[in-house]
Amino acid sequence: MLKVENISVRLGKFELRDVIFTADPGGYFVLLGMSGAGKSVLLQVVGGLIRPDRGRVILNGRDITSEKIQKRGVGLVFQDSALFPHMSVYRNIAYPLLSGRMGRSQVRRRVGELADITRVAHLLKRTPLNLSGGEQQRVALARALAPEPELLLLDEPLSSLDVRLRSDLRALLRDINGRGQTMVHVTHDYEEAAMLAGRIGVIENGTVVQTGTPGEVFLNPRSEFVARFVGIRNIFGGTLGGNKGTLRNFISGGIKFTLLSDEPPGEGFVVVRAEDIVISASRPSSSAVNNFPGTVRSVQPARIGAEMMVDIGIELGALVSEESVASLGLKPGKKVWVSLKATAIKYIRR
Amino acid sequence: MSGFDPMRLVFVLLGGLVLLFIIAPLAGMFIATSPAEFFETAADREVAGSIGLTLWTSMLATIIFGVAAIPFAWILARKKFPFKKLVSAIIDVPVVIPHSAAGIAILGFVSRDTVVGRLGESVGLNFVGSAPGIILAMAFVSIPFLVNAARDGFAAVPEKLEKAALVLGASPARVFFTISLPLAWRSIVSGMIMMWARGMSEFGAVVIVAYHPMITPVLIYERFGAFGLAYARPVAVVFICVCLAFFVLLRMLSSKYDNAES
């Protein structure tokens, strides 16, 4: 278990103030916050690269606040992998093992195991420079896991990857966590947080403002940062039914959404971007499979167009143009139809 | 690209003039030296001995002071400390002061009646008029080239890689030898070649600390003073040939190393 107690640190203009959170043993803790919120600094404090001005870091009962970096039992994966460019993939993974007392054959066996878990066995002789971003991150994970850290820290590990590789790597991260590895992962991407986290800590202006399960954090946001994307991007908790490859049902608050997803049935969230919601005066005859009658609750000018809330049994936030507000006569109390394509609804597994 | 570009033409012409300015005097010197003169001079024991002395003293100066300069360069690249700008400026002093003045300074520092001079004498090292003195004078004027190149090389190594290695359990010394040094190696080698070249061609500082034994630049000067241009020229030509041969060889070796690495 990792306990971070009242960590404060000041670096130039930037500061972390009384940061408190706990990551359970074998758990997956995600620190969620905007860039500049202090997430990376916090990870470096836990990892021992930055010494805090105040507070304590306790790992499995051991106070490691002033412990040497090398003896903390903490692994760290950087956003851009930080592989050693002058060493082969094999030597990269073996690097932490070679400072210990391990024999050569033992090292070879351990590197083999790690390469199997992270699926980089075919890359061992290559140099990191000509690996893809996803391959580099896999190697970086294998290397960080090599010394069997009690805690694995991940600093935006998916940010530099494209969408397809992200889902591969997310699966790998889940798999590693499933083997009992305690993980603390830092990201600015709420979807990533929702998909991976057992618990989330929201960090804003250098302090942790809310911790809880993804459900607690997203459905009852206590920070402006989380509230903002909950407000504009509609997030609803509920249950996914049906099977892969078909149109799926998602029931939330008595409302049935139809969507596409490869995830197994179960509890989760759906996310709908306000821009993807179409408002019509009468029932539309389009390809959209989700059509709901509703009542306009509010209309407010936004940075672009207007933001409106529509009650369809649950409240949806929609972004429409000012022209639509005028031509449809949108105002509180007005009856409208809300439609959504199945592909506009994104399901996130709990 | 087609069409006439007057600016480009002017630039090329100016560039050609600069190039000619460098090549013409050297070429003239080579042309004025007959093959017979060249080989006779190369076989001259005084010349050969002097070239040998110049080569090994400059090489030793680079190696001895390199051992201290490389870790120092790492500190300059990585650490913050008070008066760092001043320290960096001090490093450059030998480049900007007249080399004869540098020679006077060193001579005052190592002559027999100084602490350093006496210390050297007690272990059998005499700095004035000897190879150790030549090495000191060469190192004094050439060390900025190595320190600066190595510092730039270390600064170009991403700090994140050093941090990653520390987190992976490596000691600071292991990080230095397995990460920082190999990744900065290219710059360090080119700095060492520069330092060696600069030391080898030094005249002003060396001539004051040690007229004898004679390094080649001093020998050229002496022959010029005693016998005139015609006698100094062949020595200069032979020395230039030897230097060039070494540099081409070293550049080839270091680029071969780079290719093998990438």
Image (spheres, grey):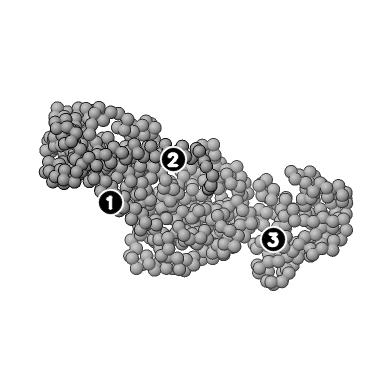
Between residues A164 and A101, which one lies in front from this camera angle?
A164
Relative horizontal placement of residue B53, taking residue B12 as reference (left or right): left
Would residue A41 be visible to someone looking at this image? yes
Residue at left offset 39%, top offset 68% = A109
Q: Are marks 1 and 2 on the same chain?
A: yes
Relative horizontal placement of residue B75, taking residue B247 as reference (left or right): right
Mark 1 and mark 2 lie on one chain; the one further toward the N terminus is 2
Query: Looking at the rendered structure, which numbered label has been put on residue B249?
Result: 1
Give the labeled residue for mark 2: B12
Q: Position of residue B79 (x, y in %)?
A: 39, 40
- Mark 2 crowd level (few <14, some 14–19, many ≥20, 10 Å Cα): few
Give the labeled residue for mark 3: A346
Residue at left offset 61%, top offset 56% = A193
Q: Is residue A344 above or below residue B173?
A: below
Distance between the alpha carbons at the discs numbered 2 and 3? 62 Å
Residue type at tag 3 = Lys
Residue type at tag 1 = Leu
Q: Position of residue A237 (x, y in %)?
A: 71, 59
Distance between the alpha carbons at the discs numbered 1 and 2? 30 Å
Chain ID for label 1?
A: B
